[in-house]
Image: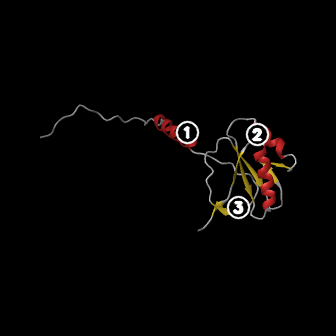
Amino acid sequence: MRLQSSARLLDGPLSVAPLIDVVLLLLIFFLLGSTFVMQPGVQIDLPDGLTGLGSPHGRRVLTITSAGEIYFDEQLTELAALPASLESFARKGVDQTVVIKADVRVPHGTVMEVLRRVLACGLDAVVASREGED
């Protein structure tokens, strides 16, 4: 016994507009849901240690190279001019953090002097390191 059906298959072009909408929404979701930390173009070798930098909001990177060059927010600066840059960053808002990334060959005294100047401006500071082996 064969049943008759009145349903017809439509042989028309498939609309891709809804598919594009879904793909764009997924792309926007992943872009807004992920965090990016901008790395300056300065090559440094971080010392070993435990890392955990928390939220990237209100955070700037201060890099000290093995040659003693200091980069704050990807701009080359001198140690004497550093407090002016730090104070302008401190005025931007509350809970501002400076991540200090110093090469493993930078003398400890230089790192501590930079850290002292960051704290003197009323900013929070984090000294970055790469995750070490136990």
- Identified at 62% across, 56% down, the residue is 51
Residue labelled with disc 2: 89
Query: Given the image, on which type of amino acid does mark 2 rest?
Result: Phe
Residue 111 appears in which quarter of the rendering? bottom right
Q: Is disc 1 placed on a helix, strand or loop? A: helix
Left or right: residue 85 versus residue 2 is right
Q: Which mark sits nearer the N-terminus, 1 or 2? A: 1
Residue labelled with disc 1: 28
Q: Nearer the viewer, mark 1 or mark 2?
A: 2
Q: Which mark sits nearer the N-terminus, 2 or 3? A: 3
Q: Is disc 3 placed on a helix, strand or loop? A: loop
Query: Given the image, on which type of amino acid does mark 3 rest?
Result: Leu
Local packing at callout 1 (Cα closer than 10 Å; few below 14, some 14-19, many 20+) is: few
Residue 120 appears in which quarter of the rendering? top right
Considering every residue shown, the one lying at the far top of the view is: 6
Q: Could you say which is closer to the camera, residue 28 or residue 96? A: 96
Point out residue 132 in the picture as x, y percentages from the top left corner: 62, 65
Image quarter in which the N terminus is found: top left
From mark 1 to mark 2, how far is it between C-alphas?
Answer: 29 Å
* Residue 46 - label: 3
Point out residue 9 in the picture as x, y percentages from the top left corner: 31, 35
Point out residue 110 in the picture as x, y percentages from the top left corner: 81, 57
From mark 2 to mark 3, how far is it between C-alphas?
Answer: 24 Å
Query: Given the image, on which type of amino acid does mark 1 rest?
Result: Ile
Local packing at callout 3 (Cα closer than 10 Å; few below 14, some 14-19, many 20+) is: some
Considering every residue shown, the one lying at the far left of the view is: 1
Q: Which mark sits nearer the N-terminus, 1 or 3? A: 1
* Residue 129 - label: none
Q: Nearer the viewer, mark 1 or mark 3?
A: 3
Left or right: residue 29 versus residue 79 is left
